[in-house]
Structure formats: structure tokens, C-alpha cells
Amino acid sequence: QTGRFLDAPAPTAGVLDPPMATTHLFSGEDSQVWELTRIADRCSKRLDKCPVTAECGTQDDWCGGTLICGATLDGSCTQKNPLTDAPYRCTSDNRCECVPRTECKGDCGEEPDGCGGTVVCGMYGNCSADTTNKLSGEQAWCIARTTTAAPSTTTESSGTVLMSLDTFHRCECVPQTCDFIVAASPENVSLATSQKLP
């Protein structure tokens, strides 16, 4: 539209710096004939930050680069499971997800996994066969025990300190009971009763 073309004079002997390109009206000279080499695609829009929904991980900046998402320098999650202290994992959609506890602390019943769910302990929640009273054959009782887990040093995005009750169960042997006869009186020969042994 301007009628001007990119132009550069021929290099001057003894001068190291190349001549500065400028524009002139078309003359047909060799100085206005250019050979262009493609280096890369021009990036029309580069992302300068991750979307607000991205809590962790990395994302493409649309120009061949990488953006690190979240509050850490490596894109890892800051939250931790309050019972195991295991850090949250970053999902494929850049969300921080709690890693539940999979192993039980107790012998039976169900225990919190630290992520809002439970993990079943023992034999489908029951005490195992080796806890049965060897004399009576009665299965052990599953007794609940509850402790307060230590507060996590990290916080949720809302700023709430992660707290949880750590509940576990122990299998306790059921003492054998015995039946014995007590002489009450000559008229009443005997009286059957039972008493739990200490």
C-alpha cells in the first residue's frame, strides 16, 4: 500500500557490522530481493498464567512453553492427608486430590482413611481366627479406640486447618465363663449359676 520495499545497501568492505535495512521505493535492484528462512510459527496468543481452576501441575502456554500451576514452584499440591501426612496428588485435570490411607492401624472394624472415606480392617471387618478364645472358641470382641490426629501443617485453599479423629479397633479376647454348683441348703440341694472368671 505504501509502495515501499525492504531494502539494504551492499556491505561495505572492511566494515564488520551489516548494513541497516530500511525501505525504499521499488527499484528492481538486488538489494530489494530477499531470501526468507522460516524459523518458527508466530504465536498469536501466549497464556501468561494458569486458569483459576488449575490447582497444581503444568499446562501448555499455547506457544510451545509450559506454565506451572498452583502455589508451589514445582506445581505440587500443598495439602496433606491429616492421618498419614501424605501429600495430595495432582490429577490429570490439574486438581489436588487426597490420597486415602489403605492400611489399617487396628485389627478389625473400619477406620477413617483421612479423605472422608473408610478402610475395612481384619477379616472383612471382623477379628481374625487366631484371636478366638482357645478354650471357649468364642470370637474376640472388636473394641473401638479413638484418638485425635495431630493438626496438619498445611491448610486447604479456604485456610481451614486439616483435623481428623483417628478411630481404630482392637480385637480383645472374651474370657471364658464357667458353670459351677453352689449348695444353698439341705432342702435345696444345689443351685446352678455362672460366673465370669477374672
Image (cartoon, rainbow, N blue to C red):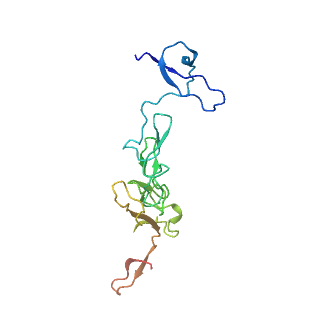
Image coordinates of residue 109 in percent, x first then y, are: 43, 60
Of residues 135 and 22, the one drawn nearer to the viewer in this rendering: 22
Note whether 183 is above or below 84 in the view shown: below
Image coordinates of residue 58 in percent, x first then y, are: 47, 43
Of residues 86 and 4, the one drawn nearer to the viewer in this rendering: 4
Of residues 66 and 40, the one drawn nearer to the viewer in this rendering: 40
**Where the C terminus falls, by quadrant?**
bottom left
Residue that protrudes farthest toward the top in the picture: 28
**Where the N terminus falls, by quadrant?**
top left
40 displayed left or right of 152? right
Note whether 157 is above or below 17 in the view shown: below
What residue lies at 48% left-to-right and 22% top-to-bottom?
A: 23
Residue that protrudes farthest toward the bottom in the picture: 186
Image coordinates of residue 138 in percent, x first then y, are: 46, 66
Image coordinates of residue 67 in percent, x first then y, are: 46, 42
Note whether 16 is above or below 129 in the view shown: above
Rendering quarter of residue 162: bottom left
What residue lies at 44% left-to-right and 61% top-to-bottom?
A: 83
Q: Give the total of numbered labels.
A: 0
57 displayed left or right of 37? left
Note whether 34 is above or below 183 in the view shown: above
180 displayed left or right of 29? left
What residue lies at 48% left-to-right and 19% top-to-bottom?
A: 24
